[in-house]
Image (spheres, rainbow, N blue to C red):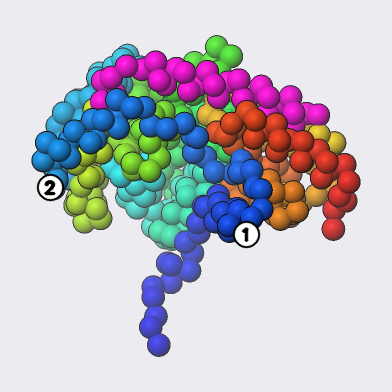
Amino acid sequence: MMQIVPAFGRIGEENAFAVLARANALAAEGRDVINLGIGQPDMPTPAHIVEAGIKALRDGHHGYTPAVGIPPLREAVARDIQRRHDVAVSPDAVLIVPGGKVTMFMAILMFGEPGAEILYPDPGFPIYRSMIEFTGATPVPVPIREANGFAFSAEETLGLITPKTRLLIVNSPANPTGGVTPKAEIDALVAGLAAHPDVAVMSDEIYGTMTYDGQAHHSLLKYESIRDRLIYLDGASKSYAMTGWRLGWSVWPKPLYDAARKLAVNAHSCVNASTQWAGISALDGPQDCVAEMVAEFDRRRNIVVDGLNDLPGVSCITPKGAFYAFPNIGKTGWKAKKLAATLLEEAGVAVIGGPDFGVHGEGYLRLSYANSAENILRALERMKTFLSERKPD
């Protein structure tokens, strides 16, 4: 009998894809399902980006590229970081990867091993914990609390660091909560990290273009004191509606860059050529498409928050970033995963139970408002009817 290594018994998954599969199966049976589960913009990739990808293919960009990415795209990433964050980054520190998850995978593999501890946000993107457990390291959840506006607490985070801590993962704007951590809290975290010079930091800033109500996104790249141990994660999936293109990028400190390059060579060789040329068009082209998408998400955000707060037993603080709401369902009497599953099967509304994002996610659901306003309103009406009529099992 075949026997795979025990590490694969520890690896988890992202339940949003399981919910998507079930929603699609129900739709194939003729059910009307509204999907507020998957974190994917419903807008098409902007036309000028699509045309750049097509042109690249017609121009003969069919072959392998450098494992770290084509130089023009790495230069475009550096220009984008300068434009958005007012930070100078060398293209030689940029690594192009097939989606944001790859940067997580690389960083956690570098620092995760039995006996090590890795801190990660909870509730947070489920792949953080999954990959930490895969390496044999101990996952240490950093509580992300509604009472704190779903921003991380610098004091609480720093208090969890021990001599075994190898890596700290931070995420703002955040998935699944939509929380945005204010500059004062980030300042305090960076100041406190001075006492822990051996702890690396991975900053997941994939939603960095998506903030609301005058909130600014403060990149950890701006903090020179931690640049020699900071791994920056970003990509095109969210900002440019390019989830299926699989294009991400990262900035690595010099001591780690070659290790990341070797992982790329061993894992995926390179990112496909036409996608990289499309990425240049995304970053160097007009940015009004991003502003328009964020403005539409903002409009939907208000619809979602108002609608959720009108549901029996539900309350929802206003998210300040990304395209997720994380309502508190504690007064409904339902457990979160059971409610999410039952809403899908009986009401035709796909959402994600909070525990799929960590132990601190119980009592919450995640709703993505990356769907049309019309569908969001229909989903909220179904949820209202369901919660008014259906009692917990």
Residue 293 magenta-highlighted: yes
The residue that appears at 32% across and 16% down in the rendered structure is 286
Determine the main secondary structure of the stretch shown in magenta: helix
Q: Position of residue 34 (x, y in %)?
A: 64, 43
Residue lying farthest front? 30
Q: Is residue 119 magenta?
A: no
Give the structural element (helix, strand or loop) at label 2: loop
Q: Residues within 10 Å of mark 1 (few under 14, many from 20)?
A: few
> Which of the 4 quarters of the picture holds residue 5?
bottom left
Figure quadrant of residue 206: top left
Q: Which mark is residue 29?
A: 1
* Residue found at x 23% / y 49%: 264
Look at the image and give the residue range highlighted in magenta.
Answer: 281-310
Q: Quadrant of the N terminus?
A: bottom left
Residue at image point 64% right, 35% down: 375
Q: Which mark is residue 63?
A: 2
